[in-house]
Image (tube, helix red, strand yellow):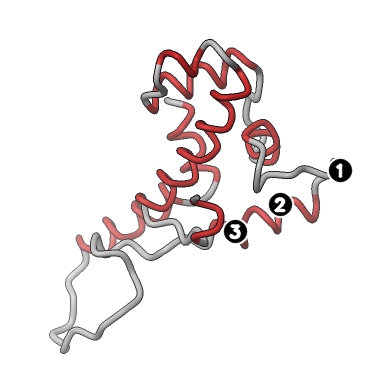
Amino acid sequence: MSLFNSILEKLGFRSAAAAKKLDENQPQPQTQPTPSAAPASGIPAIDVVAKLEGLAASHPEKLNWKTSIVDLLKLLGLDSSLNARKDLAAELGCPTQMMADSAQMNMWLHKTVLQKLAQNGGNIPPELLS
């Protein structure tokens, strides 16, 4: 499993998608559709910030997941080593010139992970995406 898929799974994205798929296989009563805040895919939005803040509150270390990819990965219980981050950066298409500078790669990686979470239905505030 890819590291980004592990991130999605840890935050409940895969379980939400699986639940939606199970729901689609069940017979549905004939009712009028109602508007919702769910993404166009029909998968309910995941409140990423609430999940991460909940994890941070019970974590023994004070982790700054809002700005640090290392802390974000640690908070999720995933490998945060340089090699793991390089693998994740390559998986997400980090530009080659940034891969040579770990600080630039880390900043790119943190921003890109949050953007990808938003693209997958995560409710990420705009200030964390810029």
Q: Residue 41: x and y, percent?
A: 24, 60
Q: Distance from label 3 to label 1 (Cα)?
A: 18 Å
How far across and down, in percent of the image, does residue 34 sit?
Answer: 24, 85
Earlier in the chain: of badge 2 and badge 3, it is: 3
Q: Secondary structure at mark 3?
A: helix
Mark 2 residue element: helix
- Residue 55 circle label: 2
Q: Quadrant of residue 107?
A: top right
Amino acid type at circle 3 is Val
- Residue sitting at x 34%, y 53%: 17
Q: Amino acid at mark 1?
A: Pro
- The CA span between labels 2 and 3 is 10 Å
Mark closer to the observer (2, 3): 3
Relative vertical location of residue 3 with respect to residue 9 in this rendering, above or below: above
| Residue identified by numbered label 3 | 49
Residue name at image x 35 percent, y 50 percent: 119
Q: Residue furthest bottom?
A: 32
Q: Is residue 130 above or below residue 90?
A: below
Q: Is residue 90 left or right of residue 25?
A: right
- Label 2 packing within 10 angstroms: few (<14), some (14-19), many (20+): some
Q: Secondary structure at mark 1?
A: loop
Of circles 3 and 1, the one toward us is: 3
Numbered badge on residue 113: none
x and y percentages locating residue 19 in the rendered image: 36, 58
Q: Nearer the viewer, residue 104 or 68?
A: 104
Q: Residues within 10 Å of mark 3 (few under 14, many from 20)?
A: some
| Residue at horizontal 42 percent and vertical 19 percent from the top | 90
Q: Is residue 91 rendered to the left or right of residue 42? A: right
Q: Residue at x 65, y 25 (%)?
A: 80
Label placed on residue 60: 1
Q: CA distance from mark 1 to mark 2?
A: 10 Å
Left/right placement of residue 40 relative to residue 113 reads left
